Image: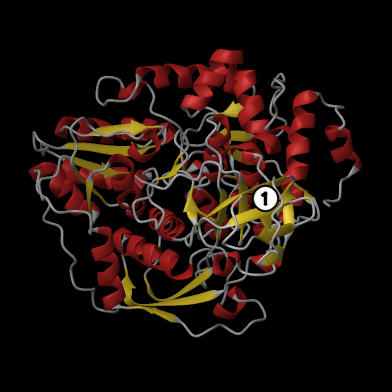
Amino acid sequence: MTPTPHPPRLVIHGRGIVPGRVHGQALVSPATISGWGGIDAATGTITERRHPLSGVCFTGKILVFPGAKGSSGWAGHFQATRLHHTAPLAMVITNLTTKAALGALLTRVPTLTEPTHDPLAHITTGDWLTLDADTGTLTIHPRHTGS
Amino acid sequence: MVALTDEDKAMRDGRDGDAVAAAMDLLIRYADALGAEEFCDTRNVAGTNTQPSPAKARLVREGGWARAFSVLSLDSDTTVDVPRMKVPTCQLQHGFGDDALGIMPYPEENIRLQADAESFYSAKGVNILATCTPYQAGNVPAYGEHIAWMESSAVVYANSVLGARTNCEGGASTGSASLTGRIPCWGNHHTENRYGTHHIEATVPIDSFHEWGMLGYFTGDAVQEARPVITGSLHPAGLADLKHFGAAAATSGGVEMYHIPGRTPDAPTLQAAFGTTPPPPPLRYGPEERRAVHEQLNSLGTSTDVDFVLLGCPHASLDQIGRIAHLLEDRTLSPHTELWIMTPLALRTVADRNGWTATIERAGGRLLTDSCPAMSRTAPAGTRVFATDSAKQAHYLPAILGIEAWYGTTEECVDAALTGRWTGHLTPPADTP
């Protein structure tokens, strides 16, 4: 939670749906994510073969993604990442559906939705972010600063 | 914040015990996350409690089924006693049962865990339908009824074909709904969110189970999570056709609701399907689009030596089983190929009575219940190449089991089971009537 000495590159506002404040690195998924048949909860990895992040681990990252797709087992699979200690650190969800809303609640990580700017257009994997779901702000830090 | 009735507050505050309080607490958090303004009453819940998983097995070892239900279905860290379900609740498809023993590499401990779960939950009032198609096995919601279902293929069927109202729920929201009879009134529960958004026009005849599946796969890919309205050269569709169409559209996209003007109950006309908005220009599904879908569903097949044929996804209807049995009369499967047909136990009982099960088994095939290869992550030992007449199974199973897939007609699949060879190909579209 080290505050950065540099001014933020951008602050995005939104609606926090699971409370909490975290500071961490972004993992940006350009495509929607499947729960059942799409992730391996035991390893916190995206497993769908056709997915652009196939094989990538989301554990401990701020997962920035457009939304949930596929089976109604979505929430249960993300809940399992909490139980297996492989959950993302937080979530930023562009398009909120029942699957994603329930999944974020059960993963119990700070989650922001209804962003004022398209996060996929402004955030790149590896960017440092501060997500405060209590106030509904997502701060994108300048790229040259570390954590 | 979601508006609460006095009854909701009483449930939240513990009047009906700790489990109901935890259920109401989760539903309130869920409604607020969605931005729902109120709850609706429901007396029809389709969820899942009995499906085995590693996390569930561990929780049951730690503190029995009460522990598993508390954590997984109520999101509660405190273990609470599970009361009787407040409203009618059914179990959807789950893992394989006893009929899998000795014929597939499916863990016996999963079968035991699930049998134990069935005893526990049926005593709590859960109806163990054990199918992805509850509407084939005694749970047919009424038109306009607010229900709380999970299983994407069942949700799209209930909304579109039956005119019931449900979102695509999850294990915890259905678990909580079954103890409270409440579900957030959001999304598909509201009339204004049920009108069509896209118009798809088929210019090739949609005249068989196979054609409906391909049109569904095209439609889901084209509209993603939106609400398509389908017109064009559509022959009358039966239960199995629409079951296949919806499952395919919910697989390639996230379709939860569609309309077929003049056929599905919320759309007497094309205009009615779109409400007060003029119908948009149609997206065309013609010969090229049809061929592209065929190629996509067959893109993971290289070897024509088929080890395994899977029919009945979503679970086969009686018509489908009867037709397959007829194709297998006095025939014998290739010694190198297994044929599994999935159906609800309730329909298997009828198939037994009709002599169809005996016909299928004499040929060397199996009529199995409760689950499917994708759900249970299993196939006959050594399977490398499988064939199916289900667009959904052709989409998922290669990723889940790392095998090759062929997608074709039911007849082509039965032929592959008899010969051990895939000879399926796309026939030119039938002449428009």
Q: Whole-percent x and y of residue A65?
A: 54, 57
* Chain letter belonging to callout 1: A
Residue B66 picture quarter: top right
- Which residue is found at the position 27% from the left and 70% from the top? B292
- Which residue is found at the position 56% from the left and 30% from the top? A83
Q: Whole-percent x and y of residue A90?
A: 62, 47
Q: Which residue is mark 1?
A: A111
User: Horizontal placement of A90 versus B36: left or right?
Assistant: left
Q: How many marks?
A: 1
Q: Is residue B185 visible?
A: no
Q: Whole-percent x and y of residue B226?
A: 54, 67
Relative to the observer, which residue lies in front, B234 or B422? Answer: B422
Which quadrant of the figure contains the C terminus of chain B? bottom left
Relative to the observer, which residue lies in front, B210 or B171? Answer: B171
- Against B370, is A5 above or below? below
Q: Whole-percent x and y of residue B1?
A: 84, 52
Relative to the observer, which residue lies in front, B340 or A105? Answer: A105
Q: Is residue B237 visible?
A: yes
User: Horizontal placement of A12 versus B377: left or right?
Assistant: right
Which residue in the rendered view is the most extreme toward the right? B6
User: Horizontal placement of A141 versus B369: left or right?
Assistant: right
- Which residue is found at the position 48% from the left and 37% from the top? A41
- Against B16, is B428 above or below? below
Residue A76 picture quarter: top right
Colour pattern of the rendering: secondary structure
SS at circle 1:
strand
Question: What amino acid type should be assigned to the residue bearing mark 1?
Answer: Thr
User: Horizontal placement of A121 versus B21: left or right?
Assistant: left
| Mark 1 nearby-residue class (10 Å; few <14, some 14–19, many ≥20) | many
